[in-house]
Image (tube, coloured by chain):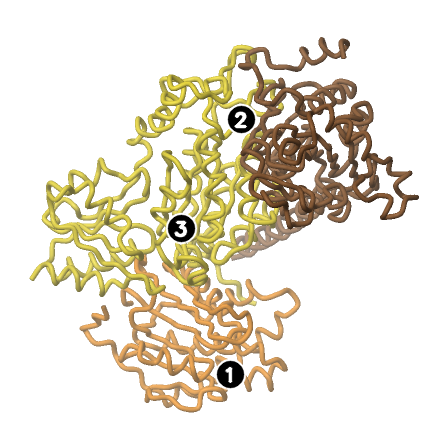
Chain colours: A orange, B yellow, C brown
C-alpha cells in the first residue's frame, strides 16, 4: 500500500459524519492494526453547518495529520462535494449521496442514495452514515491503492463496537445495504492504477 | 456475528484531550476545577466522568479565575490538581497562576491554543500563546511549559507535567493546540506500574522546626500539607523563609532568586527535545506542537530530494532549550522556525543565535495548520 | 477583656513579626477575638482549621494566628477555599473577606459559593469602604456618602450583604457588629456549626477613612452609631420601612437545611463507581468469551 491512504467524510452536522470517521479510524487502527489519524473540522453549529472528518491510514507513523491528496471522498451534501472535490487525487474516487449531491465535476463518481436507502430499508435517515460505511468497506479494498487498508470484517466489528446497545440489527442491516449498493455499482466501475509519481506534496 | 480479533488488544483510538485527561489520572491527579471552553472542553468532560470513579473530585466553577483558585486550594490540601482552558480563559487565570508561582504550589494548567486575540477563532488552531505562557502573569517568574505534538504525547507529557510540578513546586503549563487536542490517533496506554510518578517532598522535621520556604541545595523546600500538622502561612506577598510577608531587601531578593534557581539548576532535567537527522544537516527546522508534524513531513520530502535538512522538535518550550539550540546556531548554516503565530519561538531562536546563522521563519495566522508544502517551499527558496 | 488575654496568646503566632497592620481602634481586631473565642469554644484543633482570606485589611487577619493560613488574591478567597474543602473535607475552612473583596471583585464567587452550598463559613467584614488602598468607595458605601473616589458623594446604591447571601442560597446568613461582640461570638459559632455555606456579615468601623471622610467621629463614636442603628431581626420585622430608614437588622436572617455539595458529590461518586463496575464486568465477560472462542479453535 501507499505511504498514506486518505479518506474524507463530509456532509452536514447531524448526519453522523464524525461518528463515521471514528468508526472508520477504529476499523483501520484497532482492527487492522494500521497507523491512523482522524481529524475533524466543524463550525460552531451543533446541527446544520459543515461537518468533516479526515482519516489518514498508513503502515508507517503518520506525521502531517491533514489531507494532502484524497484517495476517497464521501460527500453527503452538495457543498461538501464542491468544496473537497479539488482535493481528490487523480486516482481517487468520489462517493456521493445521489439524493443530496446532484452535480459533480468529477467523472469518477460513485452515486448511491445513502439517505434514501437508510430511510426506506432501515426506517431511519440517520442510518445513512452506516450505509455509507458499508459501501466504503466494499469499495476501498477494491481500489488498487486500497488493498489491505480496511476489510469488511474490520469495518463491521468497528461499527458494532460503537453503536448503542439494542440497535445491532438495524445497523447490521444498514451496513449490508451499503455493501449491496456498492456491489451493484462496482460492476461498472474501473479503478485507475496509482501512477509511480504519487508525489502529492 | 464474526468477531474480528484485534492485533493489539489494548490499542484504542483516542483524542488528544482525552489522552491528556487519562495522563493526568495516571499521574495521580484527583482534583479538577474548570470552566467550559472550546477547544479544551473534552478534558473537563472526560474528567467529570472519570474522576468520581477513582474517588477524585471534579467541579465546574463559575469562571476560569475561580477554577485556578480552586486548583491551588486543592493542591495546598495535598491533592494533585489541574485545570484546562483555552486562550480567553487562560488570560483570566493569569493572576492566580502568578500566585501559584509565588507560593510554590504544584499544579498543571492546560491551555489548548486557539486563534486569538480575544474570542478569536474558537475552533481553529494557533500557537499564539507561547509568550503568554511565559510572561502572562505579572512580575518576574520562571515557568515550565511543555507542548505535545501527538495524542500519545498528550498522555506521556501530561504525566511529565505533573512530575515537574511536584518535583519543583511550580505550576506547569501544558500548551496544546487545537489540532493535537481534537485529533484522534491509535494509542496503547501503559499500565499504572509502567509509569514513573513523582510526588512532592513533604517535610520530615518536627512541625516546630519546619521552615516552609527554606532554601535547600535542591532549591525546592519540602511542602507542608494543610491538616497534616505543619501549620504555615501561604501568601502571594513576597515572604520570608517562614512564609510571612516581608519588606526586607535581604529577604526579598534571595527568595525571588531562589524561584529562578530552582528551575535553572535543573535545566538538563527539564529541557526536553528530540532531534531528527540534525548531524549531517546544513538546514535545521525548529518546530513544536502540531507544526512539528508538518515540519517532519517537509523534512522527509526534502531529504528525498537530496536536501540535507534536519529537524529539532521542542517538547519543552519554556525554559527555552538554549543548551540544545545554541550549538545548532554555531554548526548549521540555516535555522528555519515554522509556527502558527507571528514569530514567538523564532524570537527566542534569534536571541540565542546572536546573528551567527540565518534564521528563517514561516508564520501563519489564518487559523489553519502550516502545510509541509509551505515549509518545503521556504527550504527550496533558501537552497537555491 | 482581661480573661481573653491568655486565650488570644494561645492562638497568636509567636514567631510572627508584630505589630499588626491595623489602625488602633479598627474593628477587625475585635472580630479576630470573636473568631478565636468561637473556635476555642467549639474545641477545634489548630491543625484542622484553615483560615483563608483575600486582599485588604481583612486579608491580613490569618497571618497572625496559628492555623493553616492562606492569604489569597483579591476577591478569590472563596475559590481557594473551595479547592481546599473539596480536596480535604475534614478541614474546617473559614474565609475572611472585606466588603469590596467579597461583593465587588469577588461578587461572582460569593453568589456561586452560596448557590453551591459547600460546607464553608464566610465572614465578611463590612466597613463600607476600601481601607487598605486609602478609602475608595465600595459596593457597600451608602448612597451619598463620601470616599476618596467619590468626593462629591457616591451615586451608587449599596449591597445588603447578608440579604444577598440569603437570596443566593446560603443556608445560614447572619449579621452582627463589632459593638455587639457577645452576640457576634454566638453568630460565628452557629455559622461554624452549620452544615453548608454559612455567612456572617460583620459591621465594623473604619474611622481612619470612612469616618474621617464622612465626619462620623472617632472609633468610639462609630461604634456607638452601630449600637444605635442595629435592630434585632425579630424587632425589625415589625417595623415599617420608614422606621428602618438608616438602620440595619442584626441577628440570624436565615437558618435552613439543604444537602451540602459534598454529600451530593458523594452520590455522584457512588453512581460513577457502580457504572464502572458494570463496565468492568461486561469487559471481563467479553474477554472470557473471547478466550473460550479461541480455545474452541
Tell me the tag on residue A114.
1
**Residue A177, visible in the rendered structure:** yes
Dot 3 falls on a residue whose secondary structure is: strand
Q: Is residue B254 above or below residue C196?
A: above
Residue B209 left/right relative to C154: left
Same subunit: marks 2 and 1: no
- Report the front residue among C195 and A165: C195
Q: Indicate which disc, 2 or 3, sits on the residue closer to the N terminus.
A: 3
Estimate the x, y position of residue C289 in percent, counting from the top left: 59, 54
Residue B92 is tagged as none
- Residue C75 visible in the snapshot: no
Q: Position of residue A161 (x, y in %)?
A: 55, 62
The crowd level at tag 2 (other Cα within 10 Å; few <14, some 14-19, many 20+) is many
Front: mark 1 or 3: 3
Q: Mark 3 points at which residue?
A: B176
Please name the residue that numbered disc 2 is placed on: B234
Amino acid at each position: 500500500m501507499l505511504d498514506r491512504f486518505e479518506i474524507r467524510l463530509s456532509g452536514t452536522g447531524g448526519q453522523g459524519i464524525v461518528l463515521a470517521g471514528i468508526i472508520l479510524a477504529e476499523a483501520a487502527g484497532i482492527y487492522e492494526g494500521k497507523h491512523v489519524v482522524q481529524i475533524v473540522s466543524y463550525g460552531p453549529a451543533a446541527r446544520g453547518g459543515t461537518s468533516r472528518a479526515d482519516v489518514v491510514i498508513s503502515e508507517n507513523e503518520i506525521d502531517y495529520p491533514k489531507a494532502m491528496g484524497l484517495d476517497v471522498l464521501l460527500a453527503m451534501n452538495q457543498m461538501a462535494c464542491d468544496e473537497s472535490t479539488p482535493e481528490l487525487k487523480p486516482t481517487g474516487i468520489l462517493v456521493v449521496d445521489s439524493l443530496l449531491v446532484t452535480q459533480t465535476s468529477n467523472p469518477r463518481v460513485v452515486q448511491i442514495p445513502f439517505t434514501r436507502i437508510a430511510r426506506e430499508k432501515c426506517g431511519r435517515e440517520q442510518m445513512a452514515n452506516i450505509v455509507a460505511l458499508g459501501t466504503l468497506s466494499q469499495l476501498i479494498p477494491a481500489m488498487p491503492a486500497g488493498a489491505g487498508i480496511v476489510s469488511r470484517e474490520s469495518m463491521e466489528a468497528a461499527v458494532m463496537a460503537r453503536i448503542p446497545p439494542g440497535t445491532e440489527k438495524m445497523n447490521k442491516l444498514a451496513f449490508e445495504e451499503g455493501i449491496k449498493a456498492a456491489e451493484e455499482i462496482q460492476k461498472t466501475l474501473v479503478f485507475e492504477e496509482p501512477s509511480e509519481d504519487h508525489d502529492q506534496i | 456475528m464474526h468477531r474480528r480479533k484485534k492485533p493489539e488488544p489494548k490499542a484504542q483510538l483516542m483524542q488528544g484531550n482525552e489522552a491528556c485527561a487519562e495522563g493526568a489520572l495516571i499521574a495521580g491527579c484527583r482534583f479538577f476545577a474548570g470552566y467550559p471552553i472550546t477547544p479544551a472542553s473534552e478534558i473537563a468532560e472526560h474528567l467529570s466522568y472519570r474522576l468520581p470513579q477513582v474517588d477524585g473530585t471534579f467541579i465546574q466553577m463559575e469562571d476560569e479565575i475561580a477554577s485556578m483558585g480552586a486548583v491551588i486550594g486543592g493542591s495546598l490540601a495535598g491533592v494533585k490538581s489541574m485545570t484546562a482552558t483555552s486562550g480567553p480563559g487562560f488570560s483570566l487565570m493569569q493572576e492566580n497562576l502568578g500566585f501559584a508561582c509565588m507560593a510554590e504550589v504544584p499544579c498543571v494548567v492546560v491551555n489548548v491554543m486557539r486563534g486569538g486575540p480575544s474570542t478569536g477563532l474558537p475552533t481553529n488552531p494557533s500557537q499564539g500563546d507561547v509568550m503568554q505562557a511565559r510572561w502572562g502573569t505579572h512580575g518576574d517568574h520562571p515557568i515550565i511549559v511543555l507542548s505535545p505534538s501527538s495524542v500519545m504525547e498528550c498522555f506521556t507529557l501530561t504525566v511529565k507535567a505533573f512530575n515537574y510540578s511536584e518535583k519543583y513546586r511550580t505550576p506547569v503549563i501544558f500548551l496544546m493546540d487545537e489540532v493535537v487536542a481534537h485529533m484522534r490517533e491509535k494509542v496503547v496506554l501503559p499500565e499504572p506500574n509502567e509509569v514513573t510518578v513523582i510526588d512532592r517532598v513533604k517535610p520530615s522535621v518536627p512541625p516546630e522546626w519546619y521552615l516552609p520556604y527554606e532554601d535547600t541545595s535542591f532549591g525546592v523546600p519540602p511542602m507542608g500539607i494543610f491538616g497534616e500538622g505543619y501549620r504555615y502561612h501561604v501568601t502571594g506577598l513576597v515572604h520570608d523563609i517562614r512564609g510571612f510577608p516581608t519588606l526586607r531587601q535581604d529577604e526579598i531578593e534571595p527568595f525571588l532568586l531562589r524561584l529562578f534557581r530552582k528551575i535553572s539548576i535543573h535545566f538538563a532535567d527539564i529541557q526536553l527535545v528530540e532531534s531528527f537527522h540534525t548531524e549531517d544537516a546544513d538546514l535545521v527546522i525548529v518546530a513544536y506542537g502540531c507544526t512539528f508534524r508538518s515540519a517532519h513531513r517537509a523534512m522527509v520530502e526534502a531529504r528525498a530530494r537530496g536536501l540535507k535538512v534536519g529537524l529539532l522538535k521542542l517538547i519543552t518550550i519554556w525554559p527555552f532549550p538554549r543548551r540544545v539550540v545554541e550549538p545548532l546556531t554555531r554548526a548549521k548554516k540555516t535555522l528555519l522556525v515554522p509556527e502558527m503565530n507571528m514569530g514567538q519561538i523564532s524570537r527566542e531562536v534569534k536571541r540565542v543565535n546572536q546573528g551567527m546563522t540565518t534564521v528563517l521563519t514561516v508564520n501563519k495566522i489564518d487559523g489553519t495548520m502550516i502545510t509541509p508544502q509551505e515549509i518545503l517551499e521556504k527550504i527550496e527558496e533558501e537552497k537555491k | 477583656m482581661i480573661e481573653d488575654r491568655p486565650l488570644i496568646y494561645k492562638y497568636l503566632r509567636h514567631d510572627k513579626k508584630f505589630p499588626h497592620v491595623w489602625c488602633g481602634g479598627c474593628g477587625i481586631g475585635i472580630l479576630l477575638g470573636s473568631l478565636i473565642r468561637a473556635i476555642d469554644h467549639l474545641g477545634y484543633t489548630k491543625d484542622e482549621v484553615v483560615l483563608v482570606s483575600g486582599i485588604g485589611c481583612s486579608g491580613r487577619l490569618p497571618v497572625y494566628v496559628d492555623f493553616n493560613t492562606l492569604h489569597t488574591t483579591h476577591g478569590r478567597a472563596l475559590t481557594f477555599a473551595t479547592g481546599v474543602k473539596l480536596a480535604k473535607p475534614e478541614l474546617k475552612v473559614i474565609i475572611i473577606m472585606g466588603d469590596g473583596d467579597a461583593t465587588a471583585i469577588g461578587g461572582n464567587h460569593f453568589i456561586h459559593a452560596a448557590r453551591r452550598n459547600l460546607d464553608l463559613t464566610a465572614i465578611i467584614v463590612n466597613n463600607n469602604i476600601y481601607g487598605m488602598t486609602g478609602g475608595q468607595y465600595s459596593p457597600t458605601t451608602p448612597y451619598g456618602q463620601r470616599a476618596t473616589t467619590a468626593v462629591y458623594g457616591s451615586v451608587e446604591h449599596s449591597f445588603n450583604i447578608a440579604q444577598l447571601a440569603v437570596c443566593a442560597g446560603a443556608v445560614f446568613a447572619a449579621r452582627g457588629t463589632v459593638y455587639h461582640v457577645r452576640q457576634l461570638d454566638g453568630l460565628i459559632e452557629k455559622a461554624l456549626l452549620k452544615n453548608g455555606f454559612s455567612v456572617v456579615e460583620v459591621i465594623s468601623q473604619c474611622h481612619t477613612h470612612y469616618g474621617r471622610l464622612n465626619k462620623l467621629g472617632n472609633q468610639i463614636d462609630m461604634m456607638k452609631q452601630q449600637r444605635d442603628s442595629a435592630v434585632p431581626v425579630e424587632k425589625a420585622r415589625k417595623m415599617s420601612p420608614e422606621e428602618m430608614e438608616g438602620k440595619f437588622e442584626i441577628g440570624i436572617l436565615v437558618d435552613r437545611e439543604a444537602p451540602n455539595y459534598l454529600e451530593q458529590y458523594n452520590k455522584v461518586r457512588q453512581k460513577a463507581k457502580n457504572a464502572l463496575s458494570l463496565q468492568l464486568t461486561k469487559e471481563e465477560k467479553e474477554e472470557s468469551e473471547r478466550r473460550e472462542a479461541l480455545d474452541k479453535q
